[in-house]
Amino acid sequence: MVTDPIADFIIQLKNASAVGHKSVVLPYSKLKHEIGSKLESQGLVGSVTKKGKKIKKNLEVELLYADGSPKISAVTRVSKPGRRVYKGSKDIRTGFNTTILSTPKGILTGEEAKKENVGGEILFTIK
């Protein structure tokens, strides 16, 4: 049983890209699909598609590489089940890392959350 599906999702993406896989198939959830779509819009992963029907739904994520090295090299889970981390829009750091947040307006990157002037739970950062 997985106690933290978001951490499992991002670690599977990181591990699969470190080994050189072209894609990874994961159990489907709406939250994982939203996060995958956000990573796709940021250019960190390729296509994110839902496979299967009803009970046997899976999420297939195509992994991207730049000059043979994976686009997702380091992932840090910030907010965990035992310790949630929330930040206001003014406290969100932007820069070299891509920060993914869960906000009242849905899953957003740190830059989008600052533009929308909305805070939320910091899920993870990707280098």
Image (cartoon, grey):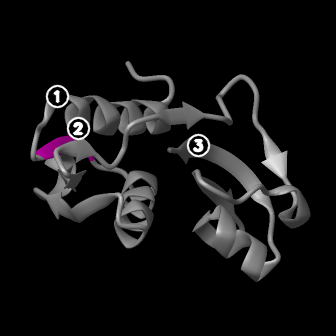
Which labelled disc corresponds to residue 19? 1
Looking at the picture, does residue 115 appear above or below residue 90? below
Label 3 vs label 1: CA separation? 21 Å
- Viewer-side residue, 76 vs 33: 76
Of all residues shown, which one is farthest toward the top?
1
Q: Which mark is residue 17?
A: 2
- The quarter of the displayed image where residue 15 is located: top left
Within 10 Å of disc 1 (Cα), the crowding (few <14, some 14-19, many 20+) is few
Q: Amino acid at mark 1?
A: Val
Identify residue for label 3: 124
Residue 78, given in percent of the width and then of the height, sits at: 66, 35
21 with respect to 81 (left or right):
left
Please state the horizontal and vertical placement of residue 54, each as a whole percent of the image.
Answer: 18, 56
What distance separates the C-alpha of mark 1 from that of mark 2? Answer: 5 Å
Using the image, tell me which numbered label, if any, was put on residue 87. Answer: none
In the drawing, does residue 118 fall left or right of residue 1?
A: right
